[in-house]
Image (spheres, rainbow, N blue to C red):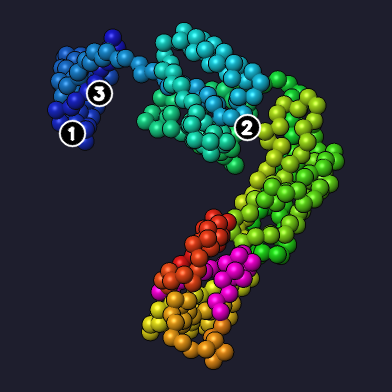
Amino acid sequence: MNWSISFEPLVSWPLFGLLFVPLLLLALVGLWFRQRGSALRFIALLALAAALLNPVFLAEEREALKSVVALIVDRSQSQDIGDRAKQTDEALAGMQQRLARFRQFDVRVVEAGKSEAADERTETKLFSALEGAFRDVPPSRIGGAIMITDGEVHDAPAGAPEFNAPLHALITGKEHEKDRRIRFENAPRFGLVGKPLDMTYRVISTQGDGAPVDVRVSVNGEQVSVEHATVGQPMKLSVTIPNAGRNIVQLGIDREPGELTDANNRAIALVDGIRENLRVLLVSGEPHAGERTWRNLLKSDASVDLVHFTILRPPEKQDGTPINELSLIAFPTRELFVEKIKDFDLIIFDRYQHRDVLPILYYDYISEYVEKGGALL
């Protein structure tokens, strides 16, 4: 229990000073000249001042709030390498046991990167977890934080962190571990089909920079070249995009003896191949007014190469007209939907009806064309 005294004046402080100061001067003058009764007047003045000041004695019972300490545990994929997971569990148990001795600490354990989603476990975001742990804690109660991690943190602040409390890190793993990884520094999302695409990559090693390394380059699962790179240096790469639609560019390096893992010895970039000119196949069936609209719309764009066929005479129509008197050509079914279907970016069927013009078998080719990135309308 804490005792304290507080004053709650019956009059305002300016009025108290206006009344008390002259009386105090008169009482002091009387004491100085040793006038009769001056001591009693001085004591009465003090009693009056005490009554006007209205002193109040306070008895307070205070209970100190605990300081919050956060244990941020890294559970990302890199922690599954070797015995890092075991080291993490042992370090966590040890820290909980030690901090439990201090009653003034409220320990919060936050595990980062524990999600089952693969894309959320590939990045270690410890500072985001740290911010979430203290979201409901006032700054005066933040005692500090301890991170248990392998040291690979993807959301570390570039400048001075806003966390104004002690921050410690317990690093898992072993000293002088050997590991190499490769990553894309610059990988465009789009590229022209048949044209070279410039990319940049880098090989990083825990053993330092400068060593030569061979990098295998594959496009859509087929190896196209072997590049000679220097560890630690940004390297330029030029690949040709073979197909329209999604293309997979993969880089790979061999695993060295004693290397920690080869899971990061590969890097993948997804590149959407686009053609310089959009090649469109328009197949018109039943005549209608909108057919000319389709044609005019597609022909108005210089970047569109249009191939247009109109089915005017279905095969089942027989009116006795000799073949040599017809000014029509046979619909090139095999040439369009087997041999050259991959050359088109978009196939449009405009009011087309199945009248044995296109055999059922060719619908399988169209389905395969769409699965490989083609567009059908």
Q: Which of marks 2 and 1 is nearer the N terminus?
A: 1
Residues 115 and 149: in front is: 115
Q: Quadrant of the N terminus?
A: top left
Specify few, some or many for label 3: CA neighbours under 10 Å numbering under 14, 14-19, or 20 or more.
Answer: few
Residue 334 screen position, x and y as percent: 60, 69
Q: What element carries label 1?
A: loop
Q: Give the range drawn in magenta.
A: 330-351
Which percent across, then down, holds residue 289? Answer: 38, 84
Q: What residue is drawn where x is 29% and y is 12%?
A: 2
Q: Report the disc number at residue 152.
A: 2
Q: Which SS class for mark 2?
A: loop
Q: Position of residue 181 (x, y in %)?
A: 72, 37
Q: Check disc 1: other Cα within 10 Å, few if <14, some if 14-19, many if 20+.
A: few
Taking the spot 43% from the left edge, 29% from the top edge, the residue there is 133
Name which residue type carries label 3: Val
Q: Earlier in the sequence, mark 3 or mark 2?
A: 3
Give the residue type at disc 2: Glu
Q: Residue 29 carries which label?
A: 3
